[in-house]
């Protein structure tokens, strides 16, 4: 799919460190960003917001695309479920598995005709030093 004029806004709020597998987290964010771009039409905006607060970090990817019908919304994280002609249905199920393995979760809000918002919530983890005996 060729997109020529999608606006991407990135907003960060607060500072923190997430202890996560960098490659896996990159894979999740890239997959969700591509999904948002594919759902968008020319001149629409995709917003990425990173909000570090309290004991967790929220990474939201919000699009102004077509939205997800309620009957599809409850199935989007199932392996091999896809409404795309070219999709395998593994993207979101893999994202959910990766985020869950990091102690987090993915929430989704969507309204047909108005777009979707996926929010990744990752806990801040404290690295523990091994005791020297």
Image: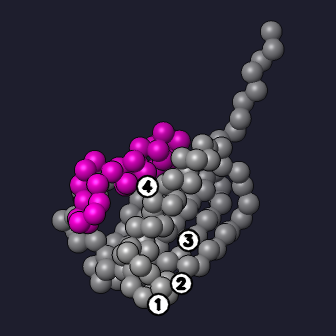
Look at mark 3 in the image and give the residue it sits on.
48
The answer to whether residue 129 is magenta is no
Look at mark 2 in the image and give the residue it sits on.
7
The magenta span reads 79-105
Residue at image location 61% in from the left, 44% down from the top = 20
Residue at image location 53% in from the left, 76% down from the top = 47
Q: CA distance from mark 1 to mark 3?
A: 16 Å
Q: Secondary structure at mark 4?
A: strand
Q: Residue 19: where, in percent of width, then height?
A: 65, 44
Look at mark 4 in the image and give the residue it sits on.
106
Among numbered discs 4 and 1, the one appearing first in the sequence: 1
Name which quarter of the figure residue 54 lies in.
bottom right
Q: Secondary structure at mark 1?
A: loop
Among numbered discs 4 and 3, the one appearing first in the sequence: 3
**Which one is nearer the viewer's eye here, 113 or 58?**
113
Look at mark 1 in the image and give the residue it sits on.
43
CB atoms of marks 4 and 3 within 8 Å:
no
């Amino acid at each position: 799919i060729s997109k020529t004029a999608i606006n991407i806004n990135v907003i960060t709020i607060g500072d923190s460190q997430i202890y996560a597998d960098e490659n896996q987290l990159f894979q999740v964010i890239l997959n969700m960003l591509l999904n948002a771009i594919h759902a968008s039409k020319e001149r629409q905006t995709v917003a990425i917001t990173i909000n570090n607060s309290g004991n967790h970090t929220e990474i939201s990817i919000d699009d102004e695309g077509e939205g997800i019908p309620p009957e599809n919304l409850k199935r989007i994280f199932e392996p091999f479920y896809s409404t795309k002609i070219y999709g395998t249905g593994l993207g979101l199920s893999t994202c959910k598995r990766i985020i869950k393995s990091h102690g987090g979760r993915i929430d989704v809000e969507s309204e047909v005709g108005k777009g979707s918002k996926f929010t990744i919530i990752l806990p801040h983890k404290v690295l523990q030093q091994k005791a020297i005996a």
